[in-house]
Image (cartoon, grey):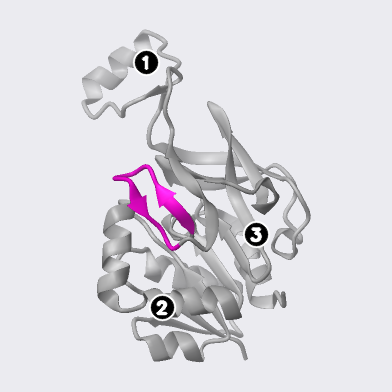
Amino acid sequence: MSTIAIVDYGMGNFHSVARALAHAAPDADIRICNQPGQIAAADRVVFPGQGAMADCMRTLDESGLRESVLRAAREKPLLGVCVGEQMLFSRSEEGDTPGLDVFPGTVRRFAGPQFAQPVTDEGAACAAGGNHDERLKVPHMGWNRVRQTRPHALWEGIPDDTHFYFVHSYYAAPADPALTTGMSDYGIAFTCAVAAANIFAVQFHPEKSAEHGLRLYRNFVDWNP
């Protein structure tokens, strides 16, 4: 039985990830872990995250789990999800925050004339719709197609151009294009999945992505890099 540690450093949707993994892989031993020894003992690791990058990095350091995550990234299958993917990169434009520097690259904000700040007032939102404002709102929220740019075991059984669920204002821009294994489009084409050796990481939320998200989690449980 494979033991899967979900890293609980206080800034992730840990219970949703655990429920999805349990559904996708009922034969796995799934544990939400907040101690270094628990992560070290696991066969594979899921590293989720949500919220501001600076808060996630600060909380990870305060939790004492930073070195455990880095060790897992070197030694065992690791799946990064959402901000968990972003944290694997060198730095983020969000507060000019240093990341874990597992992958070289920068986490960038959706910016430019095609993007607008979110409208929080319902009346203003209706007015914007009435004016046919074609600018894209940030954060990017909802279902979007993912193009598989190269084969990978975690894409097994998932058709190319499958829709996955996104909630994000920032995206990873790898310094090495060979890291990219999935792309999506939101005003621009952006990297939404990366992979190298024993690491696979995605910007979207598999736990919110119905059948194909569960298949990705199942593939992770079966993956032997």
Residue drawn at (38%, 32%), measured in percent from left and top?
Answer: 138
Q: Is residue 137 above or below residue 82?
A: above
- Is 37 or 13 nearer to us in this picture? 37
Q: Please indicate, yes or no, whether residue 84 appears anywhere in the rendered image.
A: yes
Residue drawn at (59%, 43%), measured in percent from left and top?
Answer: 191
| Residue carrying label 3 | 195
In the rendered structure, which amino acid carries the disc numbered 3? Answer: Ala
In the rendered structure, which amino acid carries the disc numbered 2? Answer: Glu
Q: Earlier in the sequence, mark 1 or mark 3?
A: 1
Judged from the image, the secondary structure of the residue bearing numbered disc 3 is: strand
Please give the label number shown on residue 67: 2
Residue drawn at (32%, 72%), measured in percent from left and top?
Answer: 9
Q: Is residue 140 above or below residue 91?
A: above
Q: Quadrant of the N terminus?
A: bottom right
Locate residue 207 relative to residue 146 in the image: left or right: left
Q: Is residue 90 above or below residue 223?
A: above
Which stretch is magenta? 89-100
Q: Earlier in the sequence, mark 2 or mark 3?
A: 2
Q: Residues within 10 Å of mark 3 (few under 14, many from 20)?
A: many
| Residue carrying label 1 | 129
Give the number of the mark in front: 1 or 3: 3
Please give the label number shown on residue 174: none
Q: Please indicate, yes or no, whether residue 19 appears anywhere in the rendered image.
A: no
In the rendered structure, which amino acid carries the disc numbered 1? Answer: Gly
- Is 10 or 111 nearer to us in this picture? 111
Q: Quadrant of the C terminus?
A: bottom right
- Is 75 or 8 nearer to us in this picture? 75
Q: Quadrant of residue 122?
A: top left
